[in-house]
């Protein structure tokens, strides 16, 4: 993980399920100085996104980088432009 090279104070991971992601990042942070946290979030479910946002806001005072990766774009694209599918 490239982020680990920059010695962040925390790394927050999200996804629908944890599936060992936290353990993989902890192994990459071999010095043990990075606090790795997981928050469940499904980007296709707005209520889930709101819950996750609250957990993150309550759990940290600073957020430097936010990366979201989800397959929702195509779903929204189909909804917004059904004639293009």
Image (cartoon, grey):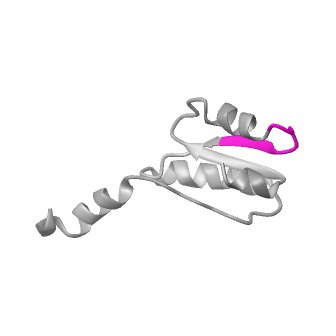
**Residue 56 highlighted magenta (yes or no):** no
Q: Is residue 79 above or below residue 4?
A: below
Q: Is residue 8 above or below residue 64?
A: above
**Residue 33 highlighted magenta (yes or no):** yes
Q: Is residue 78 above or below residue 40?
A: below
Number of dots carrying numbers: 0
Q: Is residue 80 left or right of residue 56?
A: left
> Which residue reaches farthest left?
83
- When asked about the image quadrant of residue 63, the answer is bottom right
| Residue at 78 percent of width and 41 percent of height | 29
Residue 2 lies, in percent from the top left, at: 67, 54
Q: Which residues are magenta?
A: 30-38
Name the residue nearer the viewer: 70 or 4. 4
Name the residue nearer the viewer: 80 or 63. 63
Residue 20 lies, in percent from the top left, at: 60, 30
| Residue at 66 percent of width and 48 percent of height | 1
Name the residue nearer the viewer: 82 or 18. 18
| Residue at 55 percent of width and 46 percent of height | 41
Q: Is residue 42 left or right of residue 2?
A: left
Name the residue nearer the viewer: 53 or 15. 15
Q: Is residue 28 left or right of residue 35?
A: left
| Residue at 58 percent of width and 34 percent of height | 18
Residue 75 lies, in percent from the top left, at: 29, 56
Quadrant location of the C terminus? bottom left
- When asked about the image quadrant of residue 73, the answer is bottom left
């Amino acid at each position: 993980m490239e982020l680990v090279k920059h010695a962040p104070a925390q790394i927050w991971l999200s996804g629908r399920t944890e599936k060992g992601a936290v353990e993989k990042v902890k192994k990459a942070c071999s010095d043990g100085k990075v606090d790795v946290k997981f928050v469940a979030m499904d980007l296709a479910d707005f209520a889930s996104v709101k819950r996750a946002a609250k957990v993150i806001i309550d759990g940290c005072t600073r957020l430097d980088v936010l990366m979201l990766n989800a397959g929702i774009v195509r779903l929204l694209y189909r909804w917004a432009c059904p004639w293009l599918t």
